[in-house]
């Protein structure tokens, strides 16, 4: 690859408490404007890896990390890094949609307002832009000041995506964002991701191998904290190099 | 051998009885005070200074004193109590130090109120030289109220779903912004309830104000926070035990006013709680 790496993960090992490592010696490059899918069975360390990319694991006590994670060449765990700024640059959408207990508009503008944006017109513009990009604008444009909780599950998840887009991030992390959604809503979210990768870099933990194969540009297979293999999706899902990858994607386990 | 159905009936009867036994004394106490004291309540009783060795006139300075002391208690206990609760719930890790703090809070709650009174006398009245004053009394009552405020506020803060915090942090919020915008608004009803319940207890206490602020007989309103004042609980004690020939009606009237004052705190707490609960959107 000649392209500049967005994220460079080098020799990453991560421990919760004193147990065995949740991630073992991971080396992975994430390129701009791609959808990288990190898949594997439960407890393989996918979410942990995702949460390390915007330092959400800082909220967990007693963890230990070895190795480095570089964003645009800068070590995000270096002392003096502005973590809140990093989290705006690298946004996260969670498995379950968790709207903040306020209005639709309040949810979308939450991040920008915390960052100090006070200009009403600018916030309105961001709201429309983000909701459009998350394919939710047409459904909610007339009720922006109604409680976000009144939305359906699928709409809530797109709202959570819009909320992250309003941060104007460079990278979007999605931790199994369609786990609670019906097939129709899932299709909508997947479709918006395909559009979004033009402007963003997307790292996603998918709901299933099928979803991974549907949307990934590149894919990485994790098993028990180890990166078994990673490759262009078309290659990895048709000609896996490792027996374990093949067993997993053909449904022999997992 | 008793059959299962019979033992079920016995248990049910006993439990029902227990519930009623709880209610009966409350009804009796309140009813008795109302019946005995209602006759004493008049505009003059509430708004006039006591006269004739407190046998005549009203109880205004005692009512004002209790209200002022309650506000003073709130001013002392709220910032410290809520601040400590936020620290314990949001910032503190589980270390020997925070365990010690929690232990101290539990023990504070168990200290008899007369000990608070003596402590207040030693520290605020004498050592800090505030004298017998509203300041010393408010500080003493504030300390007494702290454990209730801290534990209820901490409970209210912890009951805010963790997911809101994670979302706020993940959207680039600092820890304090997260507390300020997500945690506190949702914990507020619980915190306010805790504060009011604490104040309710403080308003009715006699022992802590005995040595720190309460005047035996002071038929005027306090001039400053360094002034003494009469207060309802102590006044009630005085007119019930220290003044010969006191009309029973006046004693029960005073008790009734104190009761109404404390109950109105309770009502206010309930109104605030239900008001905020309706606003809550999760």
Image (cartoon, coloured by chain):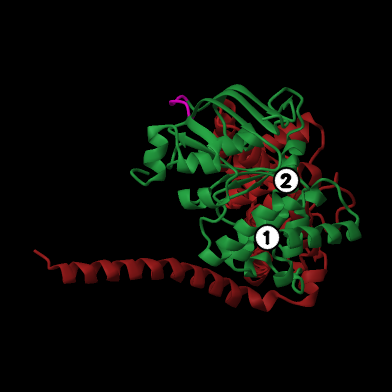
Find chain B in the image and tell me its colour.
red
Q: Is residue A170 above or below residue A184?
A: above
Task: Decide: few, some or many residues near mark 1? Use Cα within 10 Å; few <14, some 14-19, many ≥20.
Answer: many
In the rendered image, which quarter is residue B146 located in? top right
Task: From the image, state whether disc 2 or disc 1 is nearer to you.
Answer: 2
Residues A29 and A96: in front is A29
Residue occupying the point 54% across, 50% down: A176
- Residue B140 seen in the current view: no
Question: Which stretch appears magenta?
Answer: A18-22
In the image, residue A67 lies at what x, y percent? 60, 21
SS under mark 2: loop
Of residues B203 and A74, the one drawn nearer to the viewer in this rendering:
A74
Q: Which chain is green?
A: A
* Marking on residue A159: 1
Q: Is residue A54 visible?
A: yes
Check the picture and name the quadrant holding the C terminus of chain A: top left
- Picture coordinates of residue B268 (x, y %)? 68, 66
Residue at 51% over, 59% down? A180
Image coords of residue A165 (percent x, y) = 74, 52
A178 above or below A76?
below
Please name the residue that numbered disc 2 is placed on.
Answer: A200
Q: Nearer the viewer, residue B276 or A61?
A: A61
Give the x, y percent position of residue B104: 58, 34
């Amino acid at each position: 690859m000649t392209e500049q790496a967005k994220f460079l993960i080098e020799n990453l090992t991560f421990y919760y408490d004193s147990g065995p490592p949740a991630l073992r010696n991971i080396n992975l490059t994430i390129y701009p404007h791609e959808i990288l899918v990190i898949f594997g069975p439960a407890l393989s360390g996918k979410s942990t890896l995702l949460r390390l990319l915007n330092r959400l694991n800082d909220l967990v006590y007693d963890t230990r990390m070895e190795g480095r994670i570089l964003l645009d060449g800068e070590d995000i765990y270096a002392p003096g890094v502005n973590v809140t700024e990093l989290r705006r640059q690298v946004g996260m959408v969670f498995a379950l949609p968790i709207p903040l207990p306020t209005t639709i508009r309040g949810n979308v503008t939450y991040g920008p307002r915390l960052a100090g944006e006070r200009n009403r017109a600018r916030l309105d513009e961001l709201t429309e832009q983000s909701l459009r990009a998350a394919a939710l604008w047409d459904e909610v444009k007339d009720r922006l000041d109604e409680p976000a909780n009144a939305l359906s599950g699928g709409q809530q998840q797109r709202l959570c995506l819009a909320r992250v887009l309003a941060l104007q991030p460079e990278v979007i992390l999605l931790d199994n964002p369609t786990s609670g959604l019906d097939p129709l809503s899932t299709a909508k979210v997947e479709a918006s991701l395909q559009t979004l990768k033009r402007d963003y870099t997307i790292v996603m933990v998918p709901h299933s191998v099928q979803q991974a194969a549907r949307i990934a540009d590149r894919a990485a297979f994790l098993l028990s904290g180890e990166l078994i293999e990673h490759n262009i999706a078309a290659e990895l899902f048709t000609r896996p190099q490792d027996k374990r990858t093949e067993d997993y994607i053909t449904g022999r386990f997992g | 051998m008793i059959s299962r159905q019979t033992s079920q009936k016995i248990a049910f009867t006993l439990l029902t009885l227990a519930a009623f036994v709880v209610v009966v004394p409350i009804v009796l106490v309140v009813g008795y005070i109302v019946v005995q004291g209602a006759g004493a309540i008049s505009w003059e009783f509430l708004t006039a200074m006591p006269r004739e060795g407190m046998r005549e006139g009203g109880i205004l300075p005692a009512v004002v004193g209790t209200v002022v002391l309650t506000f003073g208690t709130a001013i002392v206990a709220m910032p410290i109590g809520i601040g400590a609760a936020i620290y314990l719930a949001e910032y503190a890790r589980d270390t020997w130090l925070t365990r010690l703090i929690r232990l101290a809070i539990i023990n504070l709650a168990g200290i008899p109120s007369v000990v608070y009174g003596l402590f207040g006398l030693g520290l605020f009245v004498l050592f800090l030289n505030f004298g017998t004053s509203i300041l010393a009394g408010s500080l003493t009552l504030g300390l007494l109220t702290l454990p209730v405020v801290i534990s209820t506020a901490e409970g209210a803060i912890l009951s805010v779903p963790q997911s809101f915090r994670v979302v706020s942090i993940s959207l680039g919020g600092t820890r304090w912004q997260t507390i300020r915008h997500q945690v506190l608004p949702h914990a507020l009803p619980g915190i306010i309830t805790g504060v009011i319940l604490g104040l309710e207890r403080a308003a009715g206490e006699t022992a802590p104000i005995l040595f720190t602020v309460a005047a035996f007989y002071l038929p005027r309103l306090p001039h400053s926070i360094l002034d003494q004042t009469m207060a309802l609980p102590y006044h009630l004690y005085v007119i019930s035990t220290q003044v010969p020939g006191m009309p029973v009606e006046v004693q029960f009237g005073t008790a009734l006013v104190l009761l109404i004052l404390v109950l109105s705190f309770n009502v206010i707490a309930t109104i605030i709680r239900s008001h905020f609960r309706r606003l809550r959107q999760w």
